[in-house]
Every structure is written in C-alpha cells, then in structure tokens.
Amino acid sequence: MTLFIQRILEKIGHLLESGPLLARAKPLFDAIDSFLLSRETVTPAAPHIRDAMELKRFMILVVAAAMPLALFSIYQYGWRAVAIILVSYLCGVGAEAVFVVARREEFTEGAFVSCMLYPLTLPPTIPLWMAGLGIIVGIVFGKEVFGGTGKNIFNPALVGRVFIAVAFPVEMTTRWLMPASGGLGRFTAYTSDTVTGATPLIVYKGTRAVTPVADLFFGNIPGSLGEGCKILILAAGLFLILTRIVNWRLPVSMLGAVWVASYFGSALWPERIAPPMFQLLSGGLLFGAVFMVTDPVTCPVTRPGKYIYGVLCGLLTVLIRNFSGYVEGVMFAILFMNIFAPLIDETVFLLTFREKRASQ
Amino acid sequence: MKRRFPKGGYTFPVRKKGPSTSFITSPLPKKVTIPLIAAHGTVMDLTVKKGDAVTAGDIIARNDQALGPAIVASISGVVEHIGEIGYLGRSVTAVTIRSSGTDSVRDIRHISRHQCDVIYISGASACGCDGIPTQYNSSRLSPASVTSIIITAIDSEPFSVLNETLLLENAKQFTEGVNLLHRLFGKVLPVHIVARSGHIKRLGFTGQMKERPWLHVHAGTKKYPHTLSIPLIERAFGRALSDKEDAVSLGCVILNVRDVLAINEAVNHGRPLIEHIFEVTGPGFGRSALAQARIGTPLKHLLPDIALADTGMRWVLNSVMSGTVIDDPAMPVTPLIQSIICIPEKRERELLWFLRPGSNRDSYSGAYLGGFMKGVTKDFNTNMHGEARPCISCGWCEEVCPRQTLMPHQIVRYAEKGLFEEAARFRPFLCIECGLCSYVCPSKLPLLERIRQCKQELQKAETP
C-alpha cells in the first residue's frame, strides 16, 4: 500500500516538474506528499538521532484536544456546527494555500489549528458566509501579511473572531441557542429554531443575576459552540499540558489572575464585579485560557514573561467584562496582550542580561 | 527549596545492560599504526626513526614544549613506516610498528619516584577531558593550579554503558585509583565523584566519605548531558557556572572511571597505556560490548562490518548527540575513542507516520504512547522524523538546555539572519554543544549547527 502510494506520488511529482505553471502547485503537492508519507530525510550531522515529535503531530494533537468540544457542540446545537467547522476549514486552508502558492513557500500546519479553534468561538446561529469571511480575514491579516507561521504577532483565530464581532455585532452577540440536554441531544437535528438572546454574561450585565455553577460547568447554558462543557475544556487543557504542547504557566496565571481579581473585586465592589466562580466558568474564559493564550507563537518566550502575560490577560479580561460596554473580554484581552508580548520579552531580556551589558 | 544543578537535560529511554556486557578483543595485532595525535593539534616530536626496534611502553613521540601527552609504542617490534594519515578530519603523522611476535611490555614503575612522571611516561596523561597535568606540559592546567578532581561514574550518553560497567567490575581498582589521585599533585585535593545513588550504596561510598574527608560523593542522574564537564562541575559545586568559567579556569581535572583505572594501572602496577578500552553500542549493533585493543589496531580488526558501505548502518564516534561519522574502517584505536555507536539509517517512507500511536517512539513531549510504555524498546534511527519548519517558540530547547539562562531559539533567530552581534547578547558561549536542543526541536531546526556557527563568527570578529 505504502509503495503504491509512493509510486503515484512520485509520478505526480515528476508531472509537476514538466511545466512552469504546474510547478507553482509544488508546495501544495509537497504538503499532501508529506501528510501521506513520512520523509526519507536522514540527519545530516550531529545529533544523529532526532525526537519523533514533528510539527504535524504537534498541531494534530491540538486539533484532537478540541475534537471532543466539536462533538459536544453537535450534541448541543445540531449538525450545523459541523457545517460551520467545514466552512472554516475550506476558507482558512484555502486562504493559506493561495499564499503558499503565491509565495512558493512550504505549507505549514498551523492553519489546521486556527481553522479548528476559530469556529468553536462562534455563536451557533452565525451565517456560514460570515464564518468563512472571518477565518479568511484571520489567516490573511492575522498571519500571512506578517510572513506566515512563526512570524505572526496576533493569534489568527482571534483576529478573525474579533473582526466579525466588530463588523457584525448583531449576529455575533444577540442570537444564541438554548443547548439541548438529555438523550441524543441534537445529534438527530441540523439546528434549532429556539433562539434566545441571553448568555449568562449578558444576563449578569443586565440583571446582576448569577447563573448556577452546575449549569455553567456542564454547559447547560447558551453560548459559543465550543465553550459549553467545562469538563471537556479542562480535560483538553490537561492533555495539552501533559504532552508539553501547552505551557502550563500561561493558563494557570491567567485563570489565577481572574480568580484573585474577581475574588477581591467582588468583595470590595459587588455591584460591579461578578463573583470568581461565575467569572471562571462563564463565557470563553476557560476556552481562551486553554487554547488561545497558549499559542506559542504569539505569547512571550521567556518564563517570567509568560507569567506576566497570563496575569495581564486575566486582569484585562475582568476589566473589560465588568467595566466596559462589552459583555465578554477574553478575546480582546488576549489580542491586546499579543501586541505587548514582544515588549514583555524585551524587558525580561534586559533584566536577565543586564549584568552582561554592565560589564561591556 | 534548594535548587539542583545542573538544570535541564533528558533521560533517553534506552535500556542499558549491566556489568554482564559482552567483550570484544582482538589477538595481538601484527601491525599497529599509532597516530601522533594530541589535543589542540600539537605537533609531536618523534623519538624513533624507521627501522628502530621498540618495546611496548617505549616513548615514540613527545613534545615537552607544546601541549600534549607522550605517545608510547603499543606493541614490541620494529618501526616500519612513518608517514601522514587522515585522522578525525585532519592530517597527522603516524608511526607504523610491525610486531616482533613477542608480547613483552616495559615496566615503568621504577623509572621515576614521582607519580606524575610515571603518568607522563606511561602515556596515561592523555586521559581526561583536558589531559592529566604534569610538569611536561601535558594539560592546559599545571599541577600547581589544580584545585579539585571530579570523576564521573555515570553514563548519560544514549546507549552508553562504559563507566558504570567498569565501575561495578573494577570497584577495588577504582578505589585504589581515587586514593592515589587525591595526593597526586603534591597536596591533598578534594575528589568529587558523581555516581548513581544505587551504586553509591552498593559500593559503600558513603562509608568511605566518613573515613576520608577529602572525598565528596554526589548522587547524579542519567540525564544527558549531565556527565559532560561543565554540568559535572555544576553538580559537584552545587552552583551554575558563568560563560567565563570552565574546567581549566576553575582548576578542575575531569576524569571518568576508565581514566582512573588507567592511572591506577600506570602508577600502582607499572603498566603503560598500550591498551585502550572503549565501548561498541547502539541499536544497529544490537548489544552493548566493551572492546579492548592495543592502541593503533585498525577498528576493522575488532569490528569487521564497521563503516562498510551499503550495510544501512551509520557508525558514529564517541557521541550520537555530538560525535562525527566514522568513514574509514582502518581507523586506528586511540585514547580519543570513548565509544562507537552504530545506528540504523532509515530512509523508508511510512504511511501516515505522524498519526500513529507510536509505542516504540521516543519523544521529549508526551505526544506518543512510547512515553508512557517504558517497557517497549524504542526505535532509534537516523531519520529526521519530520520536515524543517519555522520556529514556533515552543521553548523546548530552552527547557532541556543544561545551561542556566541559555535560550537556543533566540540565538538561532538572530544567527540565521547573520545578526551575530545581536545573538551575542544571549550569551552563545554558554553553550556546551551537547546537541539536545536540536534533538528535541519539533521544527527540526539545526540549532546546534547555528550556535556553533555563531560562536565561530563571534570569535573571528574578536580576533584582530
């Protein structure tokens, strides 16, 4: 089987070399080729052996960690969730492919993660074209204009999410669905017509009523596709930390900051700041702390920087949620802090290597 | 909480066999070719000429002015040829001796009353990372500047078994050697031994420490590269070293178990360094074995398959993490050989490789089942396991790095753009070139190569 595929791929490879126009598709062919079959490349020099981890595995594990959330979103909101995810993949990977062909660079696997995480932050009623537009903007303006994977300042999934949140506020903030509960849920339905206008954070903003913790925890509340079941998000976080894909310092410092700020804040200013457990379990905080803050490219690279970044993301979230006109603040907080990640790192470098500078 | 030094490191999941490891020996060779190779490329002065008769243990080359050990004949016979050969990437003079058939060895015990003299004359001053200091300029250290002796009795290199095997099989001789070392340089020196806690207990080092106040035994781990000289000093001294400090600047003589045994043989038993013990190991070899041969014996006499084309194997010298490839089957045995590792070359492509559970794969991450299935033998080969990708700043290289504050990813970020001055800010000279950063990198970046290049460029810029 492997040999058969290898021969076919070799033939297509030769075919692509036959004309200049076909040669443009080489990066896409290489992406498919290396996806199907491992490379024959051996180590050129020391170290003569290499770790089995590669970026494809790295990215696919993040997608795998988010997969239970996607399945749960089908249970809660019907098969339309799959349609949204598919549209996201189609548009996002398509946008990446266009840039790869235009730039004649290698296709990198980061897009697969962005295209999985982005739809999970969307409301289940979002028009499909809108979802597609968001991820295109995210991939193009969040990543490709900066030079592609590894060079981007902003988290592409969040850029897309913020773009449509700002461009289409009505669709993004007022049309939520009550999730199904019990039995097969909406595994047998495409979607639901029972539109509700209020997520727990919206309810709190209006009436100061706090949703019961159990409902928040098990996802029995309206919200974005992937933010429902907190157990699944926590399990995904644990899985990613154990596989070292996620640096534990980031989610722990962000959640810790939110807890501390809302614990003392709600005690001092109860009419303005929501209690800590409600803050932790409502909205996209847990999802953001596990999947968004932890994006290695856009967070600081230094250890102290990671703590500072996480804490500031958490504080900013509490600030935006409780003091601004916006109901949810996680995505704005993370995107805002993305800007400061290089500055935080630079400050840490200056402090760490100051002895060297002094001696010079 | 007290911090443990050195930081980082990685324990390779390789099941190593104990002292029952097999032994490879060769009969007395008919001819040996001894390269006059010394550390730092010193040119040695020949003390013999073509046609001279020599006895095993006679000095055939020395240079008391330049840095380097004395080189002794390893068999008794006649000097047949003196000429240039390629050795470890450079051209060196080599002396070929044809055996006379007799196995007489010169007893050097009574040549001098000074033990340092005996060490030099026996050729044993070639032992250790920087050579053993004697009054004959055999090390970058002088006998007066030695402040401590540090001995590693652990094998942290993947597949390596040499130190631990020799320690367990020669415990008595090792203790004799240690007793000798602490007063070797005319003063009582602290001797630090870094060993596995199990071996410390088994060999009664704790009891010995009570009787000998100069002896300090530290429990070490099998994490690579914690037995290289800088991490070893950090373990012994319990602190991180700066980029300006190394074994020479701190006056440390770094030895392993084999070095201690060779010194003991020379001083206490009068046997010159004519024979050399090294290990042959690696997944391509199938087992771990100790090899013992006269210096100058061609490797192919011991290992008929070594460096042969089309065997699908790669033979690596000394370290699979930082060593070079052996491409000459006739390469002679010298004290520079610590181990020879054989790894299978893997060029076969596999279907959906990255999606498989991978119970036989090794990874620093917990991304494969292999990380949780300790009993399954891991498949080590030369495949890259992935394509080169841009750095995603995962930080693994920094986590495994044994040096405090070293950030390989930051150095490489600037070095690959040619911004070496900017990279210098991240102290590339802290790097001990263990290669662990390149090993763990999921983006398959040549970090070790780039840092080496950065150091070279910075050194070039500094020299007027």
Image (cartoon, rainbow, N blue to C red):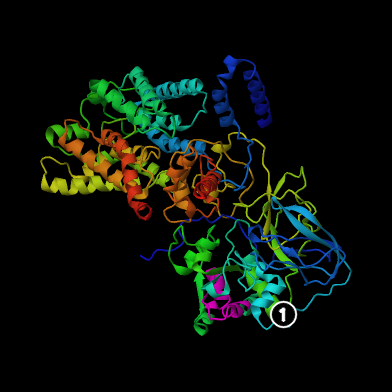
Q: Is residue B365 above or below residue B240?
A: above
In the rendered image, which quarter is residue A122 located in?
Answer: top left
Residue A240 is left or right of residue A57, and the answer is left
Q: Is residue B98 above or below residue B411?
A: below
Tag 1: Cα neighbours inside 10 Å, few (<14), some, or many (≥20)? Answer: few
Q: Position of residue A158 (x, y in %)?
A: 33, 31
Q: Position of residue B149 (x, y in %)?
A: 55, 72
Point out the residue furthest to the front here.
Answer: B464
Residue B418 in view: yes
Identity, as a three-letter code, of the amino acid under mark 1:
His
- The quadrant the N terminus of chain A occupies is top right
Q: Say whether residue A91 is magenta.
A: no
Nearest to the observer: residue A63 or residue B22: B22
Magenta region, residue range: B177-205
Q: Chain of mark 1?
A: B
Q: Position of residue A275 (x, y in %)?
A: 18, 44
